[in-house]
Image (cartoon, rainbow, N blue to C red):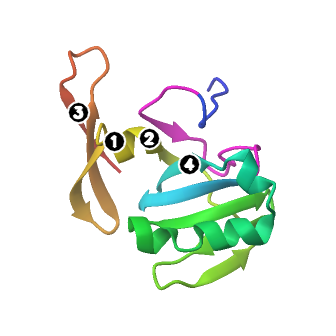
Amino acid sequence: MAEINLFKDDYTTLAWPEGKLHSEDFPYLVVRVGFGVYSLIPIPDEFIAEGEQYLIDTYGDFPQRFGYQACLVMGENRCFYFKPDGSITPHHKPPLGGSIINWIKFRKGIIRDIGGTSDRRIFVAPDPGKNEKLQKLIF
């Protein structure tokens, strides 16, 4: 797999190698949109300059605002999981691997979650090269 920057490169969805960090550009936010399905959100430099506690305070309510669990990845062995119940859990192992969905395209509705179960989500997205026909993506 060619190196891809999940924050800068244009993609809709892709499979990420099992056991591999999503980025080494710390810190960043990983959003769990389904079982083994993630989106990444870069953190603005001005937020990073404010320090770790500021980032925890800023992103800690992400599950309540957007409806998805998230993890603030500070480094290869340091992260904070933000849960729907409002709890924040420090941990040494960030999310790895999985299927990646472009967060900007997801939030704009280009990629849509059309249902499923808690362990099997169905998304639709434009099928590249097929005149914007929608394709089903089942994760």
Residue 40 disc label? 4
| CA distance for labels 4 and 3 | 22 Å
Question: Going from the N terminus, do you reach mark 1 or mark 3 first?
Answer: 1
The local secondary structure at tag 1 comes to helix
Above or below for 102 versus 39: above
Question: Going from the N terminus, do you reach mark 1 or mark 4 first?
Answer: 4
| CA distance for labels 2 and 4 | 9 Å
Marks 4 and 3: which is nearer the front? 4
The amino acid beneath tag 3 is Gln
Mark 2 and mark 3 in contact? Answer it, CB < 8 Å.
no
Look at the image and give the residue range highlighted in magenta.
9-26
Residue topped by disc 3:
135
The local secondary structure at tag 4 comes to strand
Which residue shows up at 20% across the image and 31% down it? 134
In the image, 42: left or right of 26?
Answer: left
Question: Which of the pair 46/66 is nearer the observer?
Answer: 46
Mark 1 and mark 3 in contact? Answer it, CB < 8 Å.
no
Mark 1 and mark 2 in contact? Answer it, CB < 8 Å.
yes
Residue 108 disc label? 1
| CA distance for labels 1 and 2 | 6 Å
User: Is residue 22 rendered magenta in the image?
Assistant: yes
Residue topped by disc 2:
104
Question: Which of the pair 66/18 is nearer the observer?
Answer: 66
